[in-house]
Amino acid sequence: MAGPTANEKRELIEGHALFGGLAKAGLNALVSRAHIEHFRAGEQIFNKGAPGRSMMAILRGGVRISATSSRSREFVLTTLQAGEIFGEIALLDGQNRTADAIALTDCELLVLDRREFIPFLERRPDLCILLLKIFCHRLRHTDQQVEHAVFERIDTRLAKTLLRLASDAGKGGLHTDPRVFVLVSQQELAGMIGATRESINKRLHVWQKAGLVQLGKRLIVIPDIAAIEALA
């Protein structure tokens, strides 16, 4: 199967949050240095400790970034959607990957190799500033995760995580349908919150009996988002 043409890659990149604001010359330069890769849902994109030779920008789909303990317990650092980047730390410092990356859904990724992207970045101070803003956002998110895990009750952490996932998911029904559909497993939720799957399952079933959520296979339906906001 033939890969995307230069025009098709350009169309994909133009809609990207990080690269979409580039002028035509910069966009063309980036297209000439990038290639597209596809991953199926559940497929490993890279492992922690692997050589970091590239950075990825999500064009379509979602990606889970996580770390696994020596006891094989996974902690989800973040979940990313279309328009976001990952793998940038290893790309910039040339060291190994700091976490695992797994495709949450079928994904289309724009891949930028280090040897091609670093010289390009050196000539683009605007992109450097944008990358710094992304780093700051990630650091703030990590600080919040640590603070929540140490000081907040599991109910509050669960509610805040569902609200964040809901803001990414948006409404899944008709325009007049207030429900929000969040595609996430209870194991993934546990990893995001720093709790056990059993404790998350117990709390969600209490909320289901109270009418706050509806549970499905790798699906949580929120009938009234304001009710979850009240718990956060």
Image (cartoon, rainbow, N blue to C red):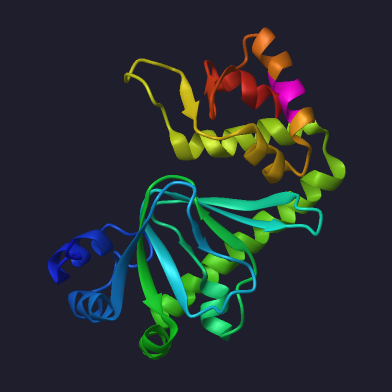
User: In the image shown, does 141 or 44 lie closer to the viewer?
Assistant: 44
Left or right position of 154 against 107: right
Q: Position of residue 1 (x, y in %)?
A: 18, 61
Span highlighted in magenta in the image: 200-204
Q: Position of residue 59 (x, y in %)?
A: 34, 56
Is residue 228 shown to the viewer in this render?
Answer: yes
Q: Determine the residue positioned at 68% across, 8% down.
A: 209
Q: Position of residue 137 (x, y in %)?
A: 58, 60
For the image, the number of numbered tags is 0
Residue 141: image quadrant is bottom right
User: In the image shown, does 177 or 62 lie closer to the viewer?
Assistant: 62
User: In the image shown, does 212 or 65 lie closer to the viewer?
Assistant: 65
The extreme right residue here reads 151
Left or right position of 113 against 195: left
Dominant SS in magenta: helix
Residue 110: image quadrant is bottom left
The extreme front residue here reads 1
Image position of 31 with respect to 151: above or below: below
Is residue 155 shown to the viewer in this render?
Answer: no
Is-magenta flag for residue 207?
no
User: In the image shown, does 126 or 165 lie closer to the viewer?
Assistant: 165
Q: Determine the residue positioned at 64% across, 73% down.
A: 49
Residue 100: image quadrant is bottom right
Image position of 44 with respect to 124: above or below: above
Q: Determine the residue positioned at 24% across, 62% down.
A: 14
Q: Quadrant of the C terminus?
A: top right
Q: Position of residue 168 (x, y in %)?
A: 47, 40
Q: Determine the residue positioned at 29% across, 72% down.
A: 35
Left or right position of 179 against 29: right
